[in-house]
């Protein structure tokens, strides 16, 4: 069994930026077949009901200018990873480098893709045809 979290705003398409997605579409795959599918509201991120005011974005960049670093960012990433701790894979259109590294460290197989349709991306994952475009889809 494999459980996959896919970031989305509408339940059908993959959000192009992890932090700006409203939901996770959680898909359970057993023996190459989707057996369950559910929409889970994200509790953290730009659209979260309890979203806190954020300091200047520049404070969240590393010396190379990559997005999503610093103690506050790591704390948010940790909360986001906890929301999908029951999942094995996370699929998104893109995300900051700090988030990517944090989710990998939390044990998730993070796949950044140019697929837009959730069903197509899940089929590609099952068929082992999905490619991780991490180099071109992180900032």
Image: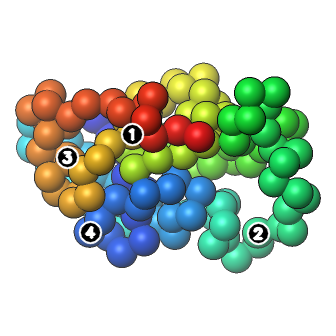
Q: Nearer the viewer, residue 90 or 31?
A: 90
Label 3: how many Cα within 10 Å (few below 14, some 14–19, many 20+): many
Tag 2, which secondary structure?
A: loop
Indicate the position of residue 83 as horizontal and vertical percent values: 58, 50
Mark 4 sits on what residue? 12
Compare marks 1 and 3 and give the one earlier in the sequence: 1
Mark 2 sits on what residue? 51
3D distance between C-alphas at marks 1 and 3: 13 Å
3D distance between C-alphas at marks 3 and 4: 11 Å
Compare marks 1 and 2 and give the one earlier in the sequence: 2
Tag 1, which secondary structure?
A: strand
Mark 4 in CB contact with mark 1 (< 8 angstroms) = no
Label 4: how many Cα within 10 Å (few below 14, some 14–19, many 20+): some
Tag 4, which secondary structure?
A: loop
Q: Which quarter of the figure is the N terminus placed in? A: top left
Mark 1 sits on what residue? 112
Mark 3 sits on what residue? 122
Indicate the position of residue 128 as horizontal and vertical percent values: 15, 28
């Amino acid at each position: 069994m494999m459980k996959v979290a896919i970031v989305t705003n509408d339940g059908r398409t993959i959000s192009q930026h992890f932090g700006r997605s409203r939901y996770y579409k959680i898909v359970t795959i057993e023996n190459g077949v989707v057996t369950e599918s559910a929409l889970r509201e994200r509790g953290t991120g730009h659209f979260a009901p309890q979203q806190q005011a954020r300091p200047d974005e520049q404070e969240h960049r590393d010396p190379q200018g990559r997005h999503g670093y610093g103690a506050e960012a790591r704390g948010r990433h940790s909360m986001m990873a906890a929301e999908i701790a029951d999942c094995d894979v996370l699929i998104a259109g893109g995300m900051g480098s700090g988030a990517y590294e944090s989710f990998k460290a939390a044990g998730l197989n993070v796949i950044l893709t140019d697929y837009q349709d959730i069903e197509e991306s899940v089929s590609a994952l099952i068929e082992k045809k999905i490619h991780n475009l991490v180099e071109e889809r992180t900032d």
